[in-house]
Amino acid sequence: MYFFLLNLALLDLGCISTTLPKALANALWDTRAISYAGCAAQLFFFLFFITAEYFLLTIMSYDRYVAICKPLHYGTLMDSRACATMAAAAWGAGVFYSLLHTASTFSLPLCQGNVVNQFFCEIPQFLKLSCSGFFLRELVLIIFSVSLLFGCFVFIVVSYVQIFLAVLRMPSEQGRHKAFSTCLPHLAVVSLFLSSAFFAHLKPPFISSPLLDLTVALLYSVVPPTLNPIIYSMRYREIKHAVSKVLQYALFQLQ
């Protein structure tokens, strides 16, 4: 679990670092400029980190399923080699997915100017600038990607259903509470990411607006990477105690 959490932390850090620093710099300098190559690089790395993170979360749900539902087989099914192979597969899938989408998106000719109405280079906003007769290939790729992500979500839900059934059979109320306090927020974050990403990429054009697009983009690009470390770190007493001390010190200073 700690090996997967290390990978998750690196992916969360990379995901946030891809979009927010440039957006903050533009806000400070009162500009919205980004080079064509910079936009392509931003899209590539954002898709890489967010896709690898989602596949890693799918693997982590399987890891928890084996740990809780098949504890006697955990050492065999999730040994160090299997964990390293799964993590490498998640990172590799992220690279392949981002390469595919970036190459497909930036091969489209632009007919509607060069203004991206978003705080980072996003595929739906880029497609709005392309010639209408050329983005069918990218649209098919997006539908395939959404189907794949939805399949991963179904796998996560099925895994957690099995976990919940096993947890409900636990005699210890404290054990049940600990399991539910981690699983439910994780499911909530994954559901938020999927629903907002689906809406951003598949919503009809007539319900699009700058404020709505910005809100949806924040929900799937910033909120999940921010909440994941909080959800997983709040399981441990030492971190809870440290956060409590920091909050008490901050309140004391305010008084």
Image (cartoon, rainbow, N blue to C red):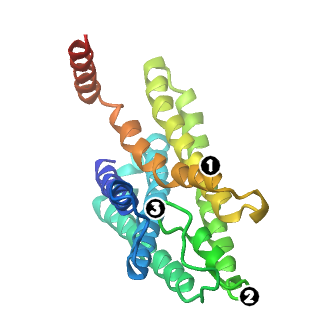
Structural crowding at the residue carrying mark 2, measured as other residues with C-alpha within 10 Å and reported as few (<14), some (14–19) or many (≥20):
few
Q: Categorize mark 3 by other alpha carbons within 10 Å: few (<14), some (14-19), many (20+).
A: many
Secondary structure at badge 2 equals: loop
Q: Looking at the picture, how far across and down is residue 83, in whole percent?
A: 34, 60
Residues at circles 3 and 2 in contact by the CB criterion of under 8 Å: no
The reply, left or right, for residue 67 in relation to residue 110 is left
Residue in the image at 31% along x and 65% along y: 84
Label ID, residue 50: 3
Q: Please tell me the numbered disc located at residue 133.
A: 2
Residue 232 higher or lower than 32, as above or below: above
Q: Name the foreground residue: 69 vs 163.
A: 163
Name the residue at 49% across, 69% down. Answer: 121
Disc number for residue 158: 1
Q: Residue at x 40, y 45 (%)?
A: 226
Element marked by disc 1: helix
Residues tagged 2 and 1 counted as in contact (Cβ below 8 A): no
Q: Position of residue 94 (x, y in %)?
A: 44, 71
Where 149 sits versus 235, above or below?
below
Find residue 74 and name its label.
Answer: none
Q: Position of residue 207 (x, y in %)?
A: 76, 57
What's under tag 3, amino acid-wise?
Ile
Q: Callout 1: few (<14), some (14-19), or many (20+) C-alpha neighbours within 10 Å? A: some
Of callouts 2 and 1, which one flags the residue occurring earlier in the amino acid sequence? 2
**Residue 138, above or below 53:** below
